[in-house]
Amino acid sequence: MIRTEELQLNMGPQHPSTHGVLRIVLRLDGEVIVEAIPHIGYLHRGIEKIAENRTYTQVIPLTDRLDYVSSMMNNFAYVLAVEELMGIEVPERASFIRIIMAELQRIASHLIAFGTGGLDAGAMTVFLYCFRERERILELFEMVCGARLTYNYFRFGGVSQDFPKEFAESARNFIKYMRPKLDEYEDLLLNNYIFQKRTKGVGVLKKKDALSYGASGPVLRGSGIKRDIRKEKPYSLYDRFDFEIPVGKNGDTWDRTWVRLEEMRQSLNIVEQALDGLPSGKVKAWGVPRMIKPPPGEVYRPIESTRGELGFYIVSDGSARPYRMKVRSPAFSNLSLIPVVIKGHQIADVVVILGSLDPVFGEVDR
Amino acid sequence: MKNPQFIKEIKKKFGKVILDFKSYNDEIILTIDKTSLLPLAKELKKIGFEYFSFVTAVDYQERIILVYRLSSFKDKVNLILKAILPLSDLKIDSVSSIWGGANWHEREVFDLFGVVFDHHPDLRRILLPENWSGHPLRKDYRDEDVVKRKEYF
Amino acid sequence: MNFSFLYLMGVAGVGIFIFIALSVLILVWLERKVAGHIQSRMGPMRVGWHGLVQTLADMVKLISKESILPAKADKWLFFLAPFVVFIPAYLSYMVIPFAPKLIIRDFNIGLLYFLAIPSISVVGIIMAGWGSNNKYALLGGLRSAAQIISYEIPRALSVVGVVMLAGSMSTVTIVKSQSSIWFILLQPLGFLIYFISTLAEVNRIPFDLPEAESELVAGFHTEYSGIKWSIFMMSEYANVFAGCALCVVLFLGGWHGFLIPKGEPWSSVVSLIWFMVKTLILIFLMMWLRWTLPRFRVDQLMDLSWKVFLPLALINIGLTGLFILGALKLFS
Amino acid sequence: MLKKFWKFFEAFQSIFIGMGITFKYLTSKAVTFQYPDQKRPISLRWRGLLALKGFMGETPHQLLRESGAEPQTYKAYVHKRLKEDTLPHCTGACPANVDVSGQNALVAEGKYLEAFEIVQERNILPGVLGRICHHPCEGRCRRGYYDEPVSIKFLHRFIAEEARKTRRKNNPKLKRELKKREEKVAIIGSGPSGLAAAFDLAKEGYQVTIFEKQKFPGGMLAIGVPLYRLPRDVLLFDIERVKGLGVEIRTGVEVGKDLTIKDLKKQGFKAILIAVGLQVSRSLPIPGIDLDGVLLAVPFLKAVNSGEKVKIGKDVIVIGGGNVAVDVARCARRVGAEKVKMVCLEARHEMPAFPWEIEESLEEGIEIHCSWGPKQILGKDGRVVGLEVKECTAVFDAQGRFAPTFCEEHTKVVEGDTVILAIGQASDLSLVEGTEIKLNERRQLIFDKVTLETTETGVFACGEVTTGPSTAIGSIATGHEAAISISRFLRGEDLRKGRLPAINLEEFEEYPQVDLEDIEEERLRPRPVKLSVEERIDNFKEIELGFKEKVAVKEALRCLRCYSEKCVGCTFCARTCPDFCIEVERTRDGKRVAKYQIEMGKCMFCGLCSEQCPTRSLVMTPQHELAFYQKELLEYDKEKLLRSEKGYAFKEKEKERKYA
C-alpha cells in the first residue's frame, strides 16, 4: 500500500494570479483541492475609519482607492448616497456625463477582468489586447479629468469639470474602434476550444449559493439570475437608456466571462446613446455649499458597479463628517464564495475561477 | 406594492419583538429585539428574502446597532433589519447558517466592532491580524500610533 | 578509437555549443519580437538594431546576477539539475543532419537515439523540482514527468510510420528517402501527432504546464536565478530547435528543396539554408501558437495524450502498413 | 463517432481562427510609443506636480483699470476676462463693474486714496453707494463660498470717508490732464445716472451742464433716500467732486417748463441727455383714493427729506412692498406715526424690498401684512379710517409676469388714519413735447437698447427712464454707457461699433449660505456697529456706522483676490487637503504669505486643493516625474518668501519650465 498525504499549499499573498494580495491555503490531494481557506486583509487600510475623520468632500479621493480598477464607480456610488442624504438635484448634463464615465469605466474594468481571465488560462495575448483598448479609455479619462487611475472626478451635485471640446469625437471614435474588437475577443478567447475546455463546467455557482452569499454583478448574472440595479431601481438617469442584461445559463466560469464581454457591448450602446442625447447646461448643481453638512439620518444607495452591488451606507449626525460609512463592496461578497466554488477542482482551476470572480483587493479589504 | 402580504404575516407572528417599523416604496426598515433574530431570519428567508447584501454595525457609543440588508428579488423589496445591542452585552446569534454570505460579513463586524456571533462556524478576525488588540471602528478606540497633525478645518 | 576522432569530436562539441548559444540568442530575440508584434507592441528596441543584442545584454545581466540557493534546498540536486536538463538537449544535436554530410554522427539508430536522449531531461526537471524544496517547483516537476513520459509514447509511435516508409532509423537515410516526396504528404496524421507531442515535450503553450506561471508561479524553476536559470532557458530553446529540426528531417524533407544546384561546391550551403528556413518556419509556428492559445489543464493534457494521440498514432501505423502493402502490391 | 469527429474539427477551427487574429496583428503596425523619439501627449488637465505661480505682496496687485481707464476699453477688458473665465465675480456682478479686488488690495496696502480713485472711475458716488448700494457683488463674492463675503460696501464707505477727510475736491492729476473741448452737453437731471454721464464726459473735456428741477442736486438720492441711510453731506461731497471737474449744475431749472429741449439746442448744446428718472408716484384706481389722508410716496419722502413738516396721523398704512414702501414706512415711523402697517401683494419671501431692509423695519415695529391687495380705502367724513384689503392668491402668472389674482371674498380691514401709496413710480416725460422724441403707448421713451439714443439725433437717455425701476448702481452703469454714446456722437464715430452688452448677473452663481458653526472668529466679516432701535426710532441719525481703519484693512485682507494668480495665503487649500499635506501661514500683519509647504510624499494628487484655489495660483503641472527633483517648488519657507520685494528664485525658473 502506498501511504498518501495531503499537501498544504499556500497560494499567495505573493502569487502572480491572485489578482492582488489574496492568500488561499489549499489542502491538496495530488492536484485536487480538498479544502480552500481564503485569508484576506493584506490591503486593509481602514478607509471606513479614515472616512470618519474626513469631511464629506475629502472622502471622494478616498473612494477612488477602494476599487482602483473602476474608481469612477466608487465616486458615483458615494456621491449618489450623499446627494440622497442632502437632497441635491443633479443637472441633467452632469448626470449624462456621469453615466458616460461610469459606462466607459465599466468597459475598462471588464477589459481587465476579461484579459486577466485569459491570462489565468495562459493566453497572454488577449490580456495585452485588452490593455491596449483600456489605454484608449484611460486617455479619454485623462482628457476629461487629468488622471488615469484615481479620478476624483465626481462632486456633490455634478462633476468637477465639463468635457473638453474634443471629447465627444474621441469617444465616438473609440466606440467605432471597440465594437469589432469585441468580436475579435470572442473568437480569440471565448470560442477557443482550449479555453472552453478550461472554463466550461468549471466553478459552477448554483443559484441558491449565489443568492445566499450575496453575489452580484456578472457573477450573479452568470448564474442565471437577471438582476441589474440599473434596471431594477434605476439611479441617475439610467431609466432613459435602452440596454439589455446578459444572463448566463450554467453559472460556470465561461458564463461569467461571457457575461462580461456582453456587458461591454451593452455599455458601448449606452455610451453611444448618452453621447447622442447629451444635453447642454451646467455640470454642477448650484447651491452646493463647500462644507457639506447633511441632516442627521442614514442612507444606503446601491449602484450596479462593474463588480456588482456597490453601496455606501452612510450615517450622518449632522456634522461635517460622516458618523459611519460602510462600504458594501461587491467583491467582498463575491470572494466569500471561493470555498464553495473551488472545492473539488484542481490547482489550475483555482486561478481561472478566481479570475472569473474578479475581485479587486482594494475593495475587498477596504 | 404598498403593503405586501408578508408584512402583515410578519407583524402577526413577530409583533412583540418588532420595536420599530418603517416602510417606504420598496424599502422596509425593521428594528427588532436581538433575541428573536434567528427565528425571524428563518421566516424572512422562507418568504423570499433570499438575497443577503451585508451586515454591518454602527456604534452609537452606549449601544451598537447591527444593520442587516436583505433583498427579495421575487417581490422586489429591500429590507433593512436592525438589531440593538447594548454595549455591555455584545452577543447575538449568527445567521450564517441561513445565509452563507453572512459568514464573512459577521467576521468583519466581529473584527472591527467586537460583536460576538454565537454559533458562527469560524469566528476569527478577517481584516486585521490575529494579534491586534481592540476593535478599530468603535468610537472609543484609541490608537497610540496615530500621528498628531495640525487640524485645519 | 584514435586521437583524431577524439579531436574531431572535441571540435564538433564546441561547435555545437557555440551553435546552440547563438541560436538561443537569436531564438529568444525572435520570440520576444514575435510576441511583441503579435501583441501590437514593438518588443525590444533599445539595444542594437531592433533590440537584436538585447538577449546578449540579458545574458550578461544573468551571468552577473547572484545565484541564490534556497535555505532548505538539496544543494547538490539543486546545483546539478540545470546541467542534467541541458546535456540531453545538447547531445540530441548529434544526429541532426543539417545538410548532406553536415552531421556529427550518422548512427543507424539515430532516430531512436534522438527520441531517447531528450527524455533524460525529465530527470533533471524532477531534480530541480525536488531540490528546490518548494511546493510549486515540486508540482511543476511532477507535472513535467507525467507530461513528458506520456507524450513520449505517441511521439515515438508517430515516427514509426516514417521509419516504415524510409526503411531505416538513420536520420540521413530518412532525409535521402524524401528526395522525391516529403513524408508530410504521406504522413499528415503522423506529422500532426509528432508536432503536437513535440510542443508538449518542450513544454510550450498550450502544454507549458510544468512552468505555468499563472498557477505554479514558475514551476520547476521558481527558485532558480542567474546563470542556472539561464541554463534552463538555454536548454528549453535548444530543445525547441532540436525538436523542430527533427520534424523537418522526418516530415519536411530535411535539406531538400528547390533550386539546389547539383555537384557545385556551394550546393550544400543552399541545402543548409533550406534546412534552416524550414526549421525556423516550424519554430515560428510554435511561437505563433504560444502567443495565441491558452493552456490545457493537467488531466485534459493526459486525456489528449492517452485517449486521442495514442490511438491515432496506432491507427497511423496500421494505415501506413496497409499503404505500404498496397503500394508493394501495386508496383510489384 | 461522427459528432466527436466534428467536435475535433471545430476545435481546430477555433484555433485557426485565433491564429488568424494574432497573425493580423503580427503584420499590422504596433500601437506602442517609441521612447524617446515619440512622446506621449499629455492632457491639459493632467494632474501632476503642484506649483504656485506667485505670492501676494511680491508684485503689486494687477488692477483692472490698467487696461485703460477709458470706459470703453475697460468694458472690453472686463468682457475679455469674462470670456477667459478669469473675471472676479464681484466685478462681474456689479452693474458698473467696479474693480473691487483692486480696491481691496489697495486698502490692504494702506493706499486709500488710490483705492478711492479706482472705485470712483466706475462708481462716481462711492460715499453714497457705500451706504445705500444693494451690493450684488457681495452675494457673488467667492469668499462667500468659504465663509462670509467681504464687506465690499463698507469698504467703499471707508475709502470715501478717508477721501472726505483730505477735503480734496478731485484728483489733481486728473484735473491737470484735462483737455478742453468746445462741445457743450446738456444733461437733464442730476441723479446718479446723470452725474455718472457728466463725470465721464467732463473727464474727456466736454462742457457739461446739468439742469436740475429741484433746488438741490442729487435726484432721487436727495429726494427719495431717507436721511438715516444717507446723510446729505456725503452726497454733497460726492457731487462736489463731479463739479470739481468743471461740470456746471443749474438747480431749480425745469426743462420742459422753464426751458425746452429746442431752447437747449439753440443755446448750443450739441448733445442732450435725458436722465430724469422716475419721479412721479403711481396712484391706484380704487374707491376712496381721493380721501383726505391719502398720500403718495415721492412727495412724502421729499417733504420728509427736505425737513418740511408733514401732516400724517398716528396710524399709517403703507401700500406696497418695494424698497420705497419700506423707506416710507420707516420715515413715517420717524416723523411721528405710532403704528405703521405695510400692506403688500407679495408673500414675505417674494417681496421686492431687500431682505435686510425688511428685517430692520420689522425691528422698528412695523407690521407687514403680506399677500393682501387693497380693495378700497374706507373713509368717514372725508377722512381715512382704514383700508379694506382682499387676499392675493398669486402675484405672478405662469410666465413669471406681474399679474396678480385675488380672492374677492376673503377680505379684512386694516385700520389707520393715513394711507401712503408706494406702489411704484413713473417718469414724467412732458419735456419731450414739441420735439421729435417719441414715446410708446405706455408713455415710455423709445430708445435704442445699445446706444441709448432716442428717436431724435443728439438726444440720449439714461438712468431709470431706460431701465425701469432700478438701483443706484444700475443707473450709474447706464450713465457710463450714455457717456460713451455721446462722446462718440460728438466725435462723429460709429455709435454701435464694438459696443458690448452689460454682463448678465446670471453668469455668476450666488453662493449658498455657509453654516458658520465651526468657523474661527477671524475668518468672519466684522459686524458693523448699528444704532439700537431705541436710539434710532425717533430721529434721522444714520443707523449703520462705518469701519475704523484697522477693521477696514483687516477686512480688505480677507479678499481672496480671485484670479489674480498670486497666492494670498487663504489656507483653503490646506483646509481641503484630505492628506493634510499643505501648510500655509501668513505673516502676523496678514499682508504676505510667510510659509507655503507641500509635503509631496503625502500628496496623492487628488487635485481638490487647486480646485479650491480662488486665485488660481496653485496649479497642477504636468510634471509628475519632477516631483522629487524640483523640491524648491514645493517648499516656500519664510526665508525665501520674505527675501525681497521682487520675489525669489522661483520666477526665473518659471521661464524655463513650460506648462502644458
Image: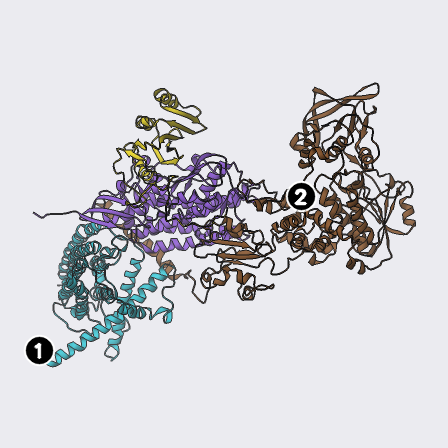
Q: Secondary structure at mark 1?
A: loop
Q: Position of residue D574 (x, y in %)?
A: 51, 51
Q: Chain of mark 2?
A: D
Tell me, yes or no, if residue B96 can be seen here: no
Residue type for callout 2 = Pro
Residue at the spot 71% in from the left edge and 38% down from the top edge:
D543
Colour scheme of the rendered structure: by chain
Q: Position of residue D15 (x, y in %)?
A: 30, 53
The residue singled out by tag 2 in the image is D136
Q: Position of residue B62 (x, y in %)?
A: 39, 33
The residue singled out by tag 1 in the image is C1
Q: Secondary structure at mark 2?
A: helix
Q: Is residue C56 above or below residue A96?
A: below
Q: Position of residue A115 (x, y in %)?
A: 35, 51
Relative side of D101 to B42, left or right: right
Residue type for callout 1 = Met
Quick one: which chain is purple?
A
Q: Chain of mark 1?
A: C
Relative side of D169 to C165, left or right: right
What tint does the image give chain B? yellow
* Front-lying residue, D24 or D486: D486
The lab-note entry on whether marks 2 and 1 share a chain reads no
Alpha-carbon span between mark 2 and mark 1:
111 Å
Q: What crowding class fits label 2: few (fewer than 14 Cα within 10 Å), some (14-19), or many (20 or more)?
A: many
What tint does the image give chain C? cyan
What tint does the image give chain D? brown
Q: Which of the 4 image quarters holds residue B136?
A: top left
User: Residue D371, which numbered label?
Assistant: none
* Front-lying residue, C183 or B42: B42
Front tag of 2 and 1: 2
Residue at the extreme left: A1
Q: What crowding class fits label 1: few (fewer than 14 Cα within 10 Å), some (14-19), or many (20 or more)?
A: few
